[in-house]
Image (tube, rainbow, N blue to C red):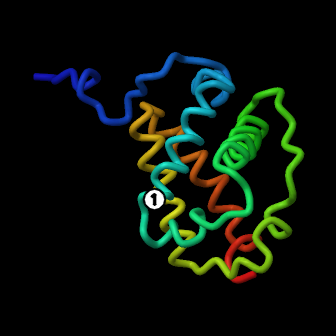
Amino acid sequence: MTTDTTATDATTSKRPAGATIYERIEGYDGFKQIATDILALHHANPILERRFGHSPKSDEELIQIVTDLLSSVTGGSEKYTGMNMLEAHTGMNVSAEDFVEVLDDILNTLQKNGVSKADQDTILGLNYGLKDEIVGH
């Protein structure tokens, strides 16, 4: 006897199919919602709030930066024009614990927004790949 588990499969996306992650996230607006939700989790996270609550950039600026960055690396036509990650994080002395908390907030947001497991893994991998440019500077 076979069982059809597709309806309950946790890896099934609530998002439409598309050729790129950008399309599956529903483009710029989808990533803007994700960036907004990530920042809200950062503010609610006591480990991260000490950084994000005192950022010289406004929440709107941070949301724009994250939206442009995520859009540009996932197939969107947006251009990321912000600083590179080393420049942006120099002087912040981001710890490995801070970095893990950021990744946890990203994962929770992707899950909340119905992003497929495969796309979650890709997006987290892209973010994890920036660790050496962010942690300890």
Asked which quadrant contains residue 5, the reply is top left
The 10 Å Cα crowd at callout 1, few under 14, some 14 to 19, many 20 or more, is some
Disc 1: which residue:
104
User: Residue 90 placed where, x, y %?
Assistant: 80, 76
Q: Is residue 102 above or below residue 116?
A: below
User: Residue 13 placed where, x, y %?
Assistant: 42, 27
Residue extending farthest to the left is: 1
Q: Is residue 120 above or below residue 94?
A: above
Q: Is residue 108 above or below residue 132?
A: above
User: Residue 105 placed where, x, y %?
Assistant: 47, 55
Q: Is residue 68 above or below residue 43?
A: above
User: Residue 85 placed where, x, y %?
Assistant: 79, 63
Instruction: Tell which of 30 and 118 is nearer to you.
Output: 30
Q: Residue at x 68, y 26 (%)?
A: 28
Quadrant in which the C terminus appears: bottom right
Q: Residue at x 45, y 39 (%)?
A: 117
